[in-house]
Image (cartoon, coloured by chain):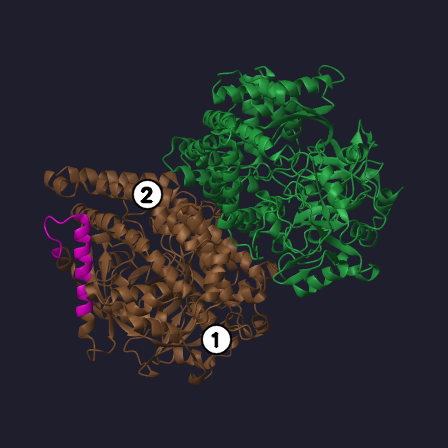
Chain colours: A green, B brown
Amino acid sequence: MKTRFGIGLGLAAGVGFASMGAITICNSARADEGMWLFTKPPTKMLKEKYGFEPDKAWLEHVQKSAVRFNDGGSGSFVSSEGLVMTNHHVGSGDLEKHSTPEKNLLKTGFYAKTRDEEIKCDDLELNVLWEVQDVTDLVKGAVGKDMSTADANTARRKKMLGLEKECEDASKKSPDGPAAYDCQVVTLYKGGKYHQYKYKRFTDVRIVMAPEQDAAFFGGDTDNFEYPRFDLDMCFFHVYEDGKPYKPEHYLKWSPNGAEDNELTFVAGHPGGTERLNTVDHLKFMRDVEAPLNMRRLWRREVQLETFMARNKEWERIAGPDFFGVQNGRKARTGILAGLQDPKLMQTKMDAEKKLRAAVDANPDNKGQWGGAWDDIKKAFDNYKTFYARTRSIGISGDLFNIARDLVRLADELPKPSPERLREYADSNLDSLYLGMYSSKPIYDDLEIDRIASSLANMTELLGGDDPYVQKALGGLSPKARAEQLVKGTKLKDVETRKAIAKGGTQAIAESKDPMIMLAKDLDSESRALRKRFEDEIEGAQRDAYSKIAAAKFAVEGEDAYPDATFTLRLAFGPIKGYKENGKDVPPFSNFEGMYSRANERKGQKGFDLPQRVWDRKDKLDLKTPLNFVSTADIIGGNSGSPVVNKKGEVVGLIFDGNIQSLILDLAYTEEQARAVAVDSRGIIEAMKKIYDAGPLADEILKK
Amino acid sequence: MKTRFGIGLGLAAGVGFASMGAITICNSARADEGMWLFTKPPTKMLKEKYGFEPDKAWLEHVQKSAVRFNDGGSGSFVSSEGLVMTNHHVGSGDLEKHSTPEKNLLKTGFYAKTRDEEIKCDDLELNVLWEVQDVTDLVKGAVGKDMSTADANTARRKKMLGLEKECEDASKKSPDGPAAYDCQVVTLYKGGKYHQYKYKRFTDVRIVMAPEQDAAFFGGDTDNFEYPRFDLDMCFFHVYEDGKPYKPEHYLKWSPNGAEDNELTFVAGHPGGTERLNTVDHLKFMRDVEAPLNMRRLWRREVQLETFMARNKEWERIAGPDFFGVQNGRKARTGILAGLQDPKLMQTKMDAEKKLRAAVDANPDNKGQWGGAWDDIKKAFDNYKTFYARTRSIGISGDLFNIARDLVRLADELPKPSPERLREYADSNLDSLYLGMYSSKPIYDDLEIDRIASSLANMTELLGGDDPYVQKALGGLSPKARAEQLVKGTKLKDVETRKAIAKGGTQAIAESKDPMIMLAKDLDSESRALRKRFEDEIEGAQRDAYSKIAAAKFAVEGEDAYPDATFTLRLAFGPIKGYKENGKDVPPFSNFEGMYSRANERKGQKGFDLPQRVWDRKDKLDLKTPLNFVSTADIIGGNSGSPVVNKKGEVVGLIFDGNIQSLILDLAYTEEQARAVAVDSRGIIEAMKKIYDAGPLADEILKK
């Protein structure tokens, strides 16, 4: 469920096997619907339905205990010593970076018995949401009266970057020092509102404990997005500040007895992105243009990576994280595309839109102000259709090319004033950028060649071999031969070389004979032009039009609505609850006994090979201990690693997945069968103590 | 290497891992190039290079010993008792059809100790090429002087069907009885020549022996198209005529000592299709339009089938043949696309075309007659581009829909005179059609649902959800729900129902409420319209233009050329010969010792799990016995199962694959690294006697 934003949104082909059944879209206040802003929680609904009203202190405590993993994922502080809990599949990239053929942490798991044994993650950044400010008027006010859509979008973007810079500068201890806070202006309701989010940044993060991947991801791709599940999908880090253990002001206590069936629970996490407010034309663009192209990319890469990994054990290890990301994305998007391709779901959306538009058109003022917004969206996507495939295919994959492109662009952008730059090179984003660019994480030639060859071939497939951009990218060689030439020729694997080129700026770039830098230079003008076209013609038009639609919705339906997910902190809620599937009851809890049964039942099949240690400790475990559970909370990719808490704000579980029926939550909420899937807090402690000999860690968590 | 023609031609994304190196296109007479017609063998070349000249008797003997498997694949008679040898992967469809969850022949292998134990394959037809007649003048003569391209194409097609009917009618014992021969007019040189091929038909074919799939396809997808290999990819059938064992006039004797390194060998088989005569614009269409779309289909289906098969053991069994076909096709087409995307290969083609066109243009007569042909091809493909995706996406997959469509079309077509019908419903093709339509092979609901849901989703992805054809196909349901409705509602699983509807003709179809029949009726007009458009505008234009290009080539380069492969009998040749890869020598022969080493080396990895029986018999085997070998013979998909014979016409091997460097043979021949891969005749006998306790079968083969 970790959302990889590098992949971008985009969906998939309708062959899930669990019966999706009839979709009942619940818009009534009865449903446990919503990914709510902490600044606008569903207090009324909670009080009416559950007799519980979270107060300000409760909300602040949970908010400041929640953590965002900057590369996609959620987590939370769970001890006074700065311990952060998340999923194994959120931490697996870091585990992989610190593995070698001889010491494969994904295979063996890891536990640092002392602080000295912990593994520092150089390029991992955690954020905690500290303050929120509504800056809607400021951002919208930056747009002049008769500005074109493109100019309006530029004006908004500059204003947003200016606000971010101001906020970050104010948090600096010295003018040249790093900002203590990361500030981001977030677009909500697709342009209806703008909020400034101020995050506390943590960049010294160290791995404490992780089980084996075979236990964390037990059931593999086969059971991914399924239920019942039996996964120990957990990973723990310690956070440091100024080299010393960080003592958080807010952290979540552990529930002594977990939670019960039907108990109300909350999820505080960072859902990546939903498309619930989309107009019908926007959904059709997703269904007919975006999703097919993105599914193609995922199928393609899944097959290619599987072939790559079959070559030998070492390649299997180094490509593992890419492969998991692709398979996971493919399965999630398959479910969403199944929803988009369902004529009934589309009809529901059409009916709702018709109703809203009729209400708008009934009032001449409203009609004049907002009535054209839906057609504007249609026009924007009719336009986007003509260059979407191009925007999606001109990139080149791989760490080395990314570094080269960042170096080339930094040289171009840094001389400009911050608000004039491409967003990711604005002052407010530089700290995070350098963290990634100067990371010493290993880069594997064979995998890089495979990634680059694949993206060069992809480009040729989509744009045609006669395209001048493709010819420039290939440089007269076949995709494979070109990839080899680039990877074997570049010096960018060396971090010091990167730093030297960055320091040398424009001149260093102009003089560089590094083939990867030269390629990035060659391709940059086209890539920038396409990006500008998207921002001016599509993003701008969407902001304008959705801002109108949001206003219309507030006017017609009231302001009691939550915005689409944007990988920012949200509160979801719902009781622990089983469901019916193919006429059978699916119980809410699973336990260790079930895990061993499933392992025996599927013996020898891919993904079901429990680690030896888990078999060895079977007799020590209380097999009836709950291991995973489901609730009706409204979550989506990006929520991976979110804590599940009870009314007291105590941890009862750890979100790691949604069932297959939950995949259409991207488009619409339903609580009939869609469920959030979590590791039970009791299962976590039982495994720590009895399988992983990590009693001291359990004690740290349980300490009052 | 079995070509599945249902899949159609179309290629893939350049990430093979074996180094393709520089491609040297050998057009000189020195290369072992060519898939030669038996009516025009390369006698001069053979004599000059190898001092061997096959005489008429040699050619007739080999030709009439060679067998074509009608569903794609090659074979040969190898005993006086009518024993036919082919590959396991050619016979695997038949093995699967006669398997059950309890008795899985793919898993266990099979050997009929007596004739009584053999398994009859109801819908398997074998053909032996008996006579060839050049009908070029007759077919071309059918075209009137000022006919449009479309009319000319129709006239040619009618003439071809008329010639076939005449030929078959002449072979009937009684006017209503079945034809003893299957007659087919074959288009050669893409329209340069037309030959009438008269095949002897065999429809009573019974499985005699097959090893376990794990031995036949040892190394799985990982080693497919690689070398060295260690595969027992063999399968044996007995042919019957009038219920009695068939005693063939011609069958291949077995070489007592196999063949040696550097020995000249021949391959007689049915290469499926090559694209060597294509113009550059035609190749670009393949590179930029056809291949990307077809690769997309293969990646998509590979991922979907892998997911399907992971659900349980039974689903793994029933989807196995589909999966093998898709994976095999994907790997082959990946290699071909890598060739198309190589700017150097394309440059070679451009240079050759430029030279030929200059020679044509140098003579005003020739220029007037042929000079416009290349631009005509370009125009045709520019046109085809606009509806190619539609033609490739409107079909619905699965056995049940195919049966329904055949029933619907039969009712429409049978009342017409044979030459007016769609080609597959012409009298000359009815016997084969009924054989498939009334086959009692098992149809699995779950797999059918998966296939249909997948093709409905595919259609929606490619044509868009608002397309009227898509909406008709979905009938208001999601792809998955619609597939379930169709499969659960149809009665076509019952063979008697099919026969009754066929008998009822137009009226039965009009009145049918069977959902599959109704769907086939709904979709047929669009599907026919697209086909007609293809035939009139693309196929017709190609025939015209390529006929001119062929004439130009004959005039400029001489008539000493072989036509592109067309799944008809061809003779290839070349010595057994190793090659160099990444600077290392790859030896020409592998042996049983190597098989056991590789199994140990890759223990536990997918595809490398040798059957227990093969392990158990290790001590009995002479481990130095050659198991597989490579030669420079010019082969391609469809050659699977072809016999490899020595100068005496004796069997020394059994073609089952090409190495990864051979995949570009689709486009151009190269003998630097491209190799045909065969099972050694000595390995076959050793395995029969010492692993499979099939001594009597070995004796039948070895009998003088």
Q: Is residue A517 left or right of residue A92?
A: left
Q: Which residue is mark 1?
A: B688
Q: Position of residue B102 (x, y in %)?
A: 56, 75
Q: Position of residue B502 (x, y in %)?
A: 32, 71
Local SS, label 1: helix
Marked residue chain, label 2 = B
Q: CA distance from mark 2 to mark 1?
A: 51 Å
Q: Is residue B626 left or right of residue B34?
A: right
Which part of the image, by quadrant, shows the C terminus of chain A?
top right
Q: Position of residue B347 (x, y in %)?
A: 33, 38
Which mark, by number, is residue A29?
A: none
Residue located at (24% from left, 75% from top) = B179
Q: Is residue A674 left or right of residue B240?
A: right
Q: Position of residue B692 (x, y in %)?
A: 51, 76
Going by the numbered disc 2, the residue's amino acid type is Lys
Can residue B577 be found in the magenta stretch? Answer: no
Marked residue chain, label 1 = B
The segment highlighted magenta reads: B141-166
Asked whether residue B301 is in view, the answer is yes
Can residue B157 be found in the magenta stretch? Answer: yes
Q: Which residue is mark 2?
A: B385
